[in-house]
Amino acid sequence: MIIENLTEFASKKFGQNFLQSDVYVHKIIQAMPNDNLRVVEIGPGLGDLTKELIKVRNVTAFEVDKRLCEHLTTEFEEPIRQGNFELRCGDVLERWESGSLLDEPYHLVANLPYYIATNIILKAFKDELCQSILVMVQKEVAVKFAAVAKQKEFSALSVLASSVGKATLCFEVEPEAFVPPPNVTSAVLLIEKNQSRDDEKFERFLKIAFSQPRKKLSKNLMTVFSKDIVNQIFAKLELDSNLRPHEAETSIYHHIYNKLKDTLDGKQQQSGKLKLSKSRERNTKQFS
């Protein structure tokens, strides 16, 4: 398949912006964990990153665009035949519905479309075989995942990331590195997992805790839980009643959650899957 105009070829439906910079491709390779685990690449696109990945790892790639599947099948005919590259055409989220993406431990590497980036990362948090997540996302999203307590960007996403491992913003990528160029700056985010966590109640709890990020944490919690119980918990944990959501350490959220989770029956809130607001990440809401 010959692609004459990459800008016209890029699908808005799939949020495609193709990375066209060898410098950043090599920086991504250098940022990968130093071991021999297989790599899962989501959205390999034209295969620019894939070409470098298969030089150092065995790779399984998931691509939803049938046009690109045709291109990749031809482009990587020899690696596919040799067995160090496997291409799976279809929606990676549907694959996650049936369990892990692979039947062995792996590292996730991807240049993620902005509209689905947060959802992909949260799915990887829950996948016990996923050992790390190295992804290109919108800078503002990367900052939220990597933020630590007392930084204004610290959010529910930060709590989830620090609950499964360590998140690091590796480097920024300017729009000009892509075709077509996006309207925002991108960044590469590395999350090195030390455990997996699949707890919808905890996500629902964080939705409540960060519902009004600039208000007091206690006040946010009191919109669902009784004032007396919240005050008792704050007193027992010796927490300042004026504490704001971004000021509390991740461990504090786990302590409070453990005290309240038995009263969080799911009827008080709608589905608690975490996503960023439209103003923070295009085409996604903070919570669905």
Image (cartoon, rainbow, N blue to C red):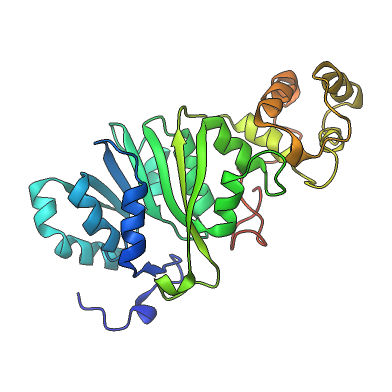
Asked if 117 appears above or below 265 in the picture, the reply is below
Q: Is residue 257 visible?
A: yes
Q: Quadrant of the N terminus?
A: bottom left
Residue drawn at the location 21% of the way across and 78% of the way down: 2
Q: Is residue 90 visible?
A: no
Asked if 274 appears above or below 259 in the picture, the reply is below
- Residue 141 image point, x, y percent: 57, 54
Residue drawn at the location 27% of the way across and 83% of the way down: 4
Give the camera-side residue of 246 and 82: 246
- Residue 111 image point, x, y percent: 40, 57
Asked if 238 appears above or below 73 in the picture, the reply is above
Residue drawn at the location 65% of the way across and 31% of the way down: 250
Give the tally of numbered discs: 0
Residue drawn at the location 52% of the way across and 29% of the way down: 197
- Residue 222 image point, x, y percent: 86, 33
Give the camera-side residue of 177 and 39: 177
Asked if 200 appears above or below 232 in the picture, the reply is below
- Residue 189 image point, x, y percent: 48, 49
Q: Residue furthest top?
A: 236
Q: Residue furthest bottom?
A: 4
Give the camera-side residue of 89 and 85: 85
**In the drawing, does residue 53 fall left or right of residue 172?**
left
**In the drawing, does residue 121 fall left or right of residue 105?**
right
